[in-house]
Image (cartoon, rainbow, N blue to C red):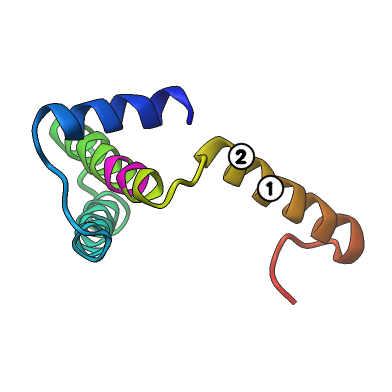
Amino acid sequence: MNEFQNIVKDFVEKNKLEMTIEHNFLDLSSELGELAKEILKLRHMGVNDAESQRKMILEFGDVFYSLVNIANQMGIDLERALNFSLEKYEDRIKETGSPGSR
């Protein structure tokens, strides 16, 4: 488990925030929607002030927290998962010239 995962684990335990994986996944989905809304404001509505940046940072933090929390519940080391994904993309780029799925 990496440093971020330990921070989230300790926070959840300290504040008694344990929930089911299903509940946490719904929370992640909701947070992704909120992040999407802030990105739309920033990109398509021309809103790009300090408050918008603050909201964007908060939404990224919420998504990250939710993802880390789910990984912790499932016993997934996120650093290891990221390394596997990067290796997969590297292999695809070498084989096809693109990181996308076939």
Task: Answer left or right for 94 relative to 40.
Answer: right
Task: Answer left or right for 38 relative to 90.
Answer: left
Name the residue located 32 percent from the left edge and 53 percent from the top edge.
43
> Looking at the rendering, in which quadrant would you find the C terminus?
bottom right
Q: Amino acid at mark 1?
A: Phe
CB atoms of marks 1 and 2 within 8 Å: yes
Name the residue located 27 percent from the left edge and 49 percent from the top edge.
42
Residue 84 appearing in the image:
yes
Q: Height in image: 54 above or below 19?
A: above
Count residues near mark 2 (Cα–Cα under 10 Å), then give few for <14, some for 14-19, many for 20+. few
| Secondary element at tag 1 | helix
Find the magenta span and give its range: 65-69
Mark drawn on residue 54: none
Q: Compare residues 50 and 71 and report the one nearer the observer.
A: 71
Image coordinates for residue 100, horizontal then vertical, percent:
69, 67
Mark drawn on residue 84: 1
